[in-house]
Structure formats: structure tokens, C-alpha cells
Amino acid sequence: MKFLSETCLFVRQFLRNRREVGSVIPSSPFLVRTMLAVPSLAPARKILELGAGLGCMTEGIVRRMRPDASVTVVEVNPVFCRELRKRFTDPRVRVLNLSVFALAAHRTERFDCIISSIPLANFTPAEQERLVEEVTRVLAPDGVYVQYQYSLISLRLLRKRFRSVRVRFVPLNIPPAFVYICDA
């Protein structure tokens, strides 16, 4: 029942604003596992999640993060934000209703690991550049940025901005997805 109500809410938000919501349904458990399998997540003290939707990645992050770690969840959609605040009452989880484009102006801290579900392909090339710039401003010098997309269109941009970029393919997601693992 929970899955059905969450999926309906997700579909409604997708239809209202496709630019903010990159998929018609939440990420599959296979995509979540691949995104969160990066070795740098376990030792991270400060984690940032971008574009949390209804929190399927957030759940996985909270389960995997160390007891003294914190996760800042940034979600631009106010409906999703309300749901995230209801769902995640753990004091280590901070939910912000904020655009990623305003991130560096609001956050002075650096993050060890950034997990992003933001639909880069929904933005213009200039906006994609700006988004990646915001990410690099708040990423720790030895941090890792993990981003998924439904195509390889952002690969060139990420390779230009990060020391190394590895790509993993996740066929068991709707639609199938590519996971970029970017080292600062």
C-alpha cells in the first residue's frame, strides 16, 4: 500500500513539473544499491543528498552511514520536502527545501560524499555547468560525487570537472540508468 501511494504521489509531481522530477517513478533498489556502493560513503562524516524525491536513497544512506555522520538532504519540490521531513526524524538528517543552484550560498561546510538524483539532462548546458560548479564548491577536496542519469550525455562535462569519473550501468531500473562516480 505504501509503495502504491508513494508511486502515485511521485507520478503526480512528475506530471506537474518534469523539470524538477526526473522520472515517473522512484529509483529501483538496484539503482539505490549501485549509487550507495561507493567505498567513500561508509567513512564519510558529512554527506549531502541532492534531489531526494521521496527518500529511497535517503533510507539507504541513513542505514549505511556511521553513527557520528550527518546527511543534509536538499530537495527543491516542497511536496517531497514535507514528506521527507515526516519520514526522517533522525536528528542526523537535515532536510532543506532549496534549489541546488543556491547551495553554495547557503552552505559553508564541505561534504565528504555527495549523492545526486538531480536530472542533469533536464537543464540547459549552461545550467548543467552551473550545477556542477555548485557541487564542486561544497565537495571536500578528497570527496566523491555520485550522480545517476538515463544517458551518457553528461559524461564529458563531468570528466572535464573531476579528476576521475567511473561509470556503472544499472539495467534493472525504469528507465535503465548510468551511475557516474566522480572523484574530486
Image (tube, helix red, strand yellow):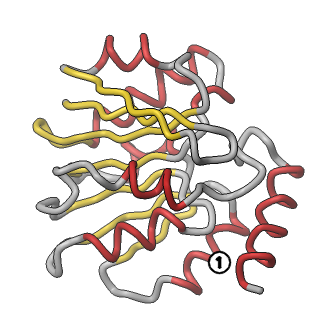
Q: Is residue 9 left or right of residue 77?
A: right
- The number of numbered discs placed on residues in the rendered structure image is 1
Local secondary structure at mark 1:
helix
Residue identified by numbered label 1: 83
Where residue 163 appears, x then y in whole percent? Answer: 19, 20
116 left or right of 182 in image: right
Query: Residue at 68% of width from left, 40% of height from top?
Result: 175
Task: Check the picture and name the quadrant holding the N terminus.
Answer: bottom right
Left or right: residue 73 versus residue 165 is: right
Nearest to the observer: residue 26 or residue 51: 26
Expressed as whole percent of the image width and height from the top left, the position of residue 85 reads: 55, 80
Query: Is 46 located above or below residue 88 in the figure?
Result: above
Which quadrant: the C terminus?
A: top left
Look at 43% across and 38% down and name the residue there.
147
Judge from the rendering whether residue 106 lies leftward or rightward of residue 80; answer left or right: left
At 45% from the left and 67% from the top, the residue drawn is 58
Point out residue 117 in the picture as x, y percentages from the top left corner.
52, 47
Q: Residue at x 32, y 15 (%)?
A: 159
Q: Position of residue 16 (x, y in %)?
A: 88, 51
Give the amino acid at mark 1.
Glu
Q: Quadrant of residue 153?
A: top right
- Quadrant of residue 46 within the rendered picture: bottom left
Q: Is residue 148 above or below residue 73?
A: above
Q: Residues within 10 Å of mark 1 (few under 14, many from 20)?
A: some
Viewer-closest of 10 and 123? 10
Classify 183 as above or below 48. Answer: above
